[in-house]
Image (cartoon, grey):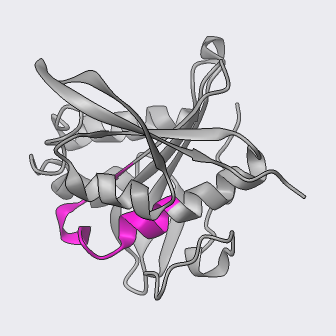
């Protein structure tokens, strides 16, 4: 089972060429079931998942099981690699969200993130995604990284643009049985020298 690279590193100490003026200080931990305790109350907020296909966690125990599954990694027969982190804002070390990258059997790399509402508008999503792109550049040089965002989710679309993603296409999607549209964006990781 492959584990997530770069655990516990601080964004402020990662120089991957994706600069931000005064980025928020963040730490990243390998996501496990214990993080559910700190994120549950923020993740049951309907606004947090309004633009995602995810269902609200039914209970704290259900979220713990989900995080434990993520921590265990992708099923062996899937030929996927799952990388999932909890995001903490320092110096208070408050849990503010999750970050993920999935490498699929065909080599496609997709990323995503989710933040509690009190963390919105503070540059956390941008800083976390830039950190993740830096990590992926070390382990997947030259690969294209994809992300999807609901066409109405202007904040996430802006995060992708600030991180250097470019628009690829718009495609049909669904959120809990309701037809929607997603913009698909792509970021090309640099080759190693």
Taking the view exactly as shown, the residue that stands out farthest to the top is 77
Using the image as rendered, state which of residue 92 and residue 109 is in the foreground: 109
Locate the N terminus and report the quarter of the image it occupies: top right
Is any part of residue 115 visible from this angle? no
Residue 55 shown left or right of residue 158 in the figure: left
Pinpoint residue 86: horizontal percent, then vertical percent. Answer: 44, 57
Magenta highlight on residue 157:
no
Above or below, 79 against 92 in this view is above
Above or below, 109 against 107 in this view is below
Pinpoint residue 38: horizontal percent, then vertical percent. Answer: 29, 61
Pinpoint residue 93: horizontal percent, then vertical percent. Answer: 40, 77
Taking the view exactly as shown, the residue that stands out farthest to the right is 193
Using the image as rendered, state which of residue 12 and residue 190 is in the foreground: 190
Above or below, 150 against 87 in this view is above
Above or below, 144 against 162 in this view is above
- The image quarter containing residue 67 is top left
Residue sitting at x 37%, y 60%: 159
Magenta highlight on residue 114:
yes
Residue sitting at x 48%, y 61%: 163
Locate the C terminus and report the quarter of the image it occupies: bottom right
Residue sitting at x 17%, y 56%: 41
Is any part of residue 46 visible from this angle? yes
Residue 9 shown left or right of residue 177 in the figure: right
Instruction: Count up the numbered dots.
Output: 0
**Residue range (magenta):** 113-129
Residue 120 shown left or right of residue 102 in the figure: left
Residue sitting at x 67%, y 42%: 3
């Amino acid at each position: 089972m492959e584990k997530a690279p770069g655990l516990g590193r601080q964004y402020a100490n990662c120089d991957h060429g994706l600069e931000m003026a005064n980025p928020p200080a963040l730490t990243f931990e390998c996501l496990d079931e214990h993080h559910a305790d700190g994120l549950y109350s923020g993740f049951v907020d309907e606004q947090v998942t309004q633009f995602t296909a995810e269902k609200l966690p039914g209970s704290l125990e259900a979220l713990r099981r989900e995080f434990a599954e993520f921590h265990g990694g992708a099923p062996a027969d899937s030929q996927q690699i799952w990388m999932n982190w909890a995001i903490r804002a320092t110096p208070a070390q408050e849990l503010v969200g999750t970050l993920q990258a999935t490498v699929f059997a065909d080599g496609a790399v997709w990323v995503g993130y989710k933040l509690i509402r009190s963390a919105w508008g503070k540059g956390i999503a941008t800083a976390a995604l830039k950190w993740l792109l830096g990590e992926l550049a070390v382990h997947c040089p030259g690969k294209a990284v994809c992300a999807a965002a609901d066409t109405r989710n202007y904040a996430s679309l802006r995060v992708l643009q600030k991180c250097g993603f470019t628009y690829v296409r718009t495609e049909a999607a669904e959120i809990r049985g309701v037809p929607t549209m997603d913009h698909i964006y792509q970021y090309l990781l640099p080759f190693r020298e």
